[in-house]
Image (cartoon, rainbow, N blue to C red):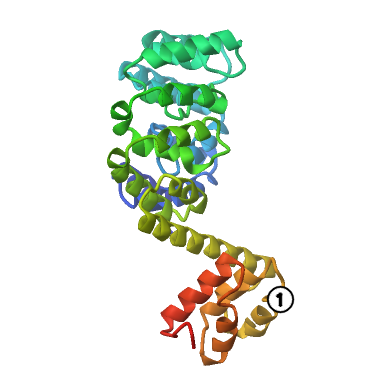
Amino acid sequence: MMDINTMFNHFLLKQNKKDWDKYARIISTKNDEELISFLPVMFDWIENIDTPGALIIYYRLKSFSKKIINEKLEIKIEETLINKKYIWTLWLIDLLEESEKKKEILEKVEAADNRFLILKMLDYENDVELQNDGIEIGKKLANFEIFIQPYVPQYEQRVWENCSKIVCSKSDKELEKFLPKIMMWLQDLNWYGSSQILSRLKKISKIILEDSLKQSINIAIENKDSNWLYNLEQLVQDVNEKGRVDLIRIDLEIEGEERLYLKGRNIESSSKYRNLYLQDLDTPYLRVGALSVLSKFFDDTMLDIFISLKDDPDDYIRRIVEKTLEDNIWEHGE
């Protein structure tokens, strides 16, 4: 098994980025003494909270002994202030104990960049008039990137609804270079501000939207995020492309149903359970998962079963049947 020193080196050298989330989970199980020499690297890991594994590292740092962490943390905070990395500063000061020093640093950040003062005004717990003032000031700022779904621990999601109003007020040209980041707001339409963002993106011309939309769709497919894919699908204007994305989304959701089915049954995907899979086709909430597993072991004896389900009312069942018959070179009408 890889040791944590190698994992941290991979992060520093920007290697195996796809494994960083896994590394972070392993690192988070280690005790303070094992991690103390790696604190500077852990601080670097949370510079951008969107970095794979960053949130896991952040929560591990939160549980660190303050006595151990404070001195090195204060040095790093000063460094981020000098380099004007204020979002990073805010994540780091959130690791400090409540104190006058913590308040002083927060005031320094707000004084250095008035956008953080505006963020403070946008908190939905504030008086409505103060929130509205913050929105109007924010709309006038040319540099508005900080308002795109900001991950700032002091305000959390409480500012997102009002931030979305600032972002949505911008022109297509102003939004264009930030579209990949803005589309990440659509990963969950329960998030504050996401519905407004979706409505605004629907009004952007296809020419401006196209490249960023394709990029986001590919990331959603790679991450098997069917929920985000469904939300992005609402922005697709080309009928053929919409159909393609819809089928990919359905395939991802079928994969999810299959995993849930096997977990619920506490079995692995194996032909030895074939009779159980067939039996579960008669149980409404199990049939998609069971048929998906059966499709992996398709043979001549199952042809009649699959053909009988060709016109099933369930989109997922029909998709599994269609794909399985195609993959096995069966003609649909036979």
Q: Nearer the viewer, residue 265 or 233?
A: 233
**Which amino acid lies under the numbered mark 1 shown in the image of this protein?**
Asp
The image shows residue 321 at horizontal and vertical percentages of 52, 76
Which residue in the rendered view is the most extreme toward the right? 283
Horizontally, is 5 left or right of 56 in the view? left
Look at the image and tell me whether residue 168 can be seen.
yes
| Residue 239: quarter of image | bottom left
Within 10 Å of the Cα at label 1, are there few (<14), some (14-19), or many (20+) other Cα atoms? few
The image shows residue 163 at horizontal and vertical percentages of 47, 23
Look at the image and tell me whether residue 95 can be seen.
no
Q: Is residue 292 above or below residue 210?
A: below
Which residue in the rendered view is the most extreme toward the bottom? 301
Q: Nearer the viewer, residue 197 or 294?
A: 197
Residue at 38%, 45% (x, y): give it. 8
Q: Nearer the viewer, residue 19 or 181?
A: 181
Q: Which quadrant would the N terminus be assigned to in this image?
A: bottom left
Q: Is residue 172 above or below residue 289?
A: above
Q: Is residue 208 above or below residue 106?
A: below
- Where disc 1 sits, the SS reads loop
The image shows residue 18 at horizontal and vertical percentages of 38, 52
Q: Is residue 117 above or below residue 28?
A: above
Residue at 59%, 75% (x, y): give it. 291
Residue at 42%, 26% (x, y): give it. 168
Q: How many marks?
A: 1
Residue at 55%, 9% (x, y): give it. 130
The image shows residue 230 at horizontal and vertical percentages of 49, 50
The residue beneath circle 1 is 282
